[in-house]
Image (tube, rainbow, N blue to C red):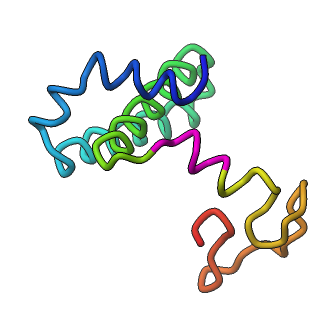
Amino acid sequence: MKVSEFQRLIEDIYGDKDAARGTAGTYMWFAEEVGELSRALRRGDRAGLEGEFADVFAWLSTLASMHQIDLERVAADKYAEGCPRCSSTPCACAEPTPTHGTARGS
């Protein structure tokens, strides 16, 4: 399944509920799932990790859909040529400092 197909699937399953909840409520659910992923990472539980990664991806897809963002397109646009900052694969940038940020955050 392509990212765009997954995004449409999540829209079909949850789109009405997501629209009713709005961005703020949906973002809170997304943040909660990221917290659950963090716990699963600490525990190293493979089954838990797989489920939490799927949940985070689904909620991220929901947020993107709510703002008419095609995740597959924007990810390809930003990363198809390698690192957005240095254009290398693998990235050749120096490690970011707290005030410098990262290529993913720019």
| Residue 85 at x, y percent in the picture | 76, 72
Q: Reply above or below: 99 against 58.
A: below
In the rendered view, would you say 1 is above or below 52?
Answer: above
Q: Which residues are magenta?
A: 70-76
The residue that appears at 89% across and 62% down in the rendered structure is 88
Q: Which of 76 and 21 lies nearest the eye of the viewer?
A: 76
The dominant secondary structure in magenta is helix
Q: Going by the picture, which residue comes out furthest to the bottom?
A: 99
Q: Position of residue 12 (x, y in %)?
A: 30, 18
Residue 71 shown left or right of residue 86 in the figure: left
Image quarter where the N terminus lies is: top right
- Residue 43 in the image: above or below residue 35: above
Q: Image quarter for residue 100?
A: bottom right
Where residue 68 appears, as percent x and y from the top left, is 35, 46
Horizontal and vertical percent for residue 46? 62, 18
- Work out which quarter of the rendered image holds the C terminus and state it: bottom right
